[in-house]
Amino acid sequence: MKISIITINYNNIEGLKQTVESVLSQTYLDKEYIVIDGGSKDGAVDFLKCQNKITYWVSEKDGGLYNAMNKGIRKLSGDYVIFMNSGDVFFDRNVLSDIFNGTVYNADVLYGSTIYKYGNGGILRNPRDLNVMSYELPFCHQSCFIKCKLMKNIEYDESYKLIADYNFFYQGWKKNWQFVQINKIVAIYDTTGVSADSARKWQIYVERCKIHGEDTSLLYYNYLNIKSTLKCFLAKIIPVNIVDFILHRAKGSNSIKELSNFKQIK
């Protein structure tokens, strides 16, 4: 099976270098690599010009993250696609080989576990029960593989600026797409630059209400903020999977064997 990897970048040269190295070091051979740069001015273009193993790249102004992602989607020629944006890396160099060598999938979406990188540390997060899709993603976007045919037919709705990915998976979940969990840590997700300011939180809430056809409510929004704050507090003193069970009634289990091999985050 041919795997497509898409990287979105804008003025993050160091993150881009890490991601390109991770993608190109994958031992799986049947792959293509697409990089969409938003017109960076930090040396990214010169760096990309020196990369002869990238299948396709372009550097030009775009209309935001999901517009850039859609540009990459239109260049796909693989069977499954994964987005590995600048700063994100695969868990190890054998991720694609472990998942796809000798195995043919027919699922619409494959998803695995993720390490969320916070500074010099990280937290392993396993996918939650798919039923939480009714209000949020049960897995990390950087740790899922989507059928290219599906992706090319639908793309991301660019009217959503922050959670078009959630809308994409939520609509598919309602249409009974086949989601299959794989027992593998797929990616290390770089949380650097992910803002948690109140304006962003409010915009996410507004977009989620639009997706579900609901009216916005300041009271309910404040309740969600309190719930999120409580989750962050509990996560510091209780294992993450137990926090998820308490707040979301979903199960999780850490892969100790794989986690013990993780050397990049200490």
Image (tube, rainbow, N blue to C red):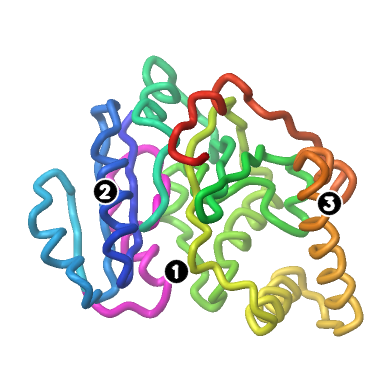
Nearest to N terminus: mark 3 or mark 2 = 2
Give the alpha-carbon distance from disc 3 to disc 1, as whole Å. Answer: 33 Å
Give the alpha-carbon distance from disc 1 to disc 2, as whole Å. Answer: 20 Å
In the displayed structure, 159 sits above or below 118; it is: below
Q: Give, as a three-letter code, the residue at label 1.
A: Tyr
Q: Residue at x 55, y 47 (%)?
A: 121
Pointer 1 residue = 66
Please identify, in this view, whether the residue under mark 3 or under mark 1 is nearer the observer.
Answer: 3
| Circle 3 SS class | helix
Please identify, in this view, whether the residue under mark 1 or under mark 2 is nearer the observer.
Answer: 2
Please identify, in this view, whether the residue under mark 3 or under mark 2 is nearer the observer.
Answer: 3
Pointer 3 residue = 234
Nearest to N terminus: mark 3 or mark 1 = 1
Pointer 2 residue = 20
Q: Quadrant of the N terminus?
A: top left
Residue 183 magenta-highlighted: no
Q: Residue at x 45, y 32 (%)?
A: 263
Q: Which residues are magenta?
A: 60-85
- Find residue 78 and report its horizontal and vertical position in percent: 31, 40
- Find residue 229 and report its horizontal and vertical position in percent: 81, 65
